[in-house]
Amino acid sequence: MIKKRIMLFAMLISISTFGCNKKPTTQKYNSTELSQSLPITYNDACYVVNVNVPKEVVGWGDYVFVAKVEEELRTEYNNVRVNEKGDKTGKPYTFYRIKVIENLKGNLKLNDSIEYYKHGGVSYDGKSISLLEGDSLLEAGKYYILIAASDEDGRLGQGLPNSSIELNINNDDELSNSDVYQAYKDYVQNEIVFDRKRFRSTYDNS
């Protein structure tokens, strides 16, 4: 698998950037399958928190929760434009249907199918996969701890890399035996809170 890197300088990657297009271009892919054959472009960035320190990442997030990914829904492209080479490009966001199993921070609806998206996915031309440095796509059928942010319109999605941590479990009953799950419960209890404007998700059950 070919891996390339490009530099993207940004103080903060937030899902609020997705709101630039009211009617984004949409495609349907099986990104997990395509990732086995397509080259991957990793985007480096600068962040306002240390994304390698879990206590800072959970402190930045609005919600931290255990979820099972049920299905990849679509890829949407924001900021579609023609670049200097004359090629049409757009920033990909991959959407999933997930089920929230347990809340560690925040109060999302449990055991309902909700929509979640993350930065990255199949490129606009379909010839590569674009991801944040250190990130990966989600896979249907797997369990994750997700650290999410809510946009002003209530959308729920990824705000930073290192925000989707795969759990090595096969069903809900195995969750309490997961060392990763136990570690993130502790990170939430001892989070390093980042002061920023926050919004309530459409899926918030408070």
Image (cartoon, grey):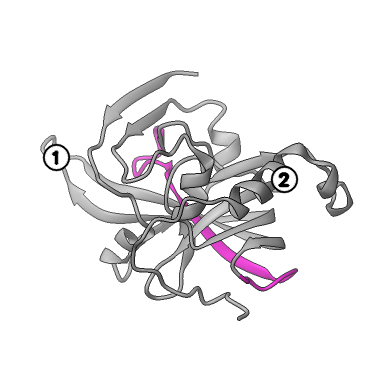
Q: How many marks?
A: 2
Q: Is residue 108 left or right of residue 88?
A: right
Q: CA distance from mark 1 to mark 2?
A: 47 Å
Dot 2: what SS?
Answer: helix
Type of the residue with mark 2? Tyr
Determine whether 44 is above or below 142 in the image: above
Asked if one can make out residue 8 in the rendered structure from this viewpoint, the answer is yes
Q: Earlier in the sequence, mark 1 or mark 2?
A: 1
Residue 205 quadrant: bottom right
- In the rendered image, residue 149, in percent from the top left (x then y), is placed at 46, 61
Read off the residue under disc 2.
Answer: 181
Which residue is the extreme one toward the front? 190
Whether 108 is among the magenta residues is yes
Query: Residue, x 42% and y 47% (percent of image)?
Result: 160
Taking depth in this image into account, of 204 and 5 the one nearest to the observer is 204
- In the rendered image, residue 163, in percent from the top left (x then y), is placed at 52, 46
Read off the residue under disc 1.
Answer: 86
Q: Which residues fall within the magenta stretch?
A: 107-130
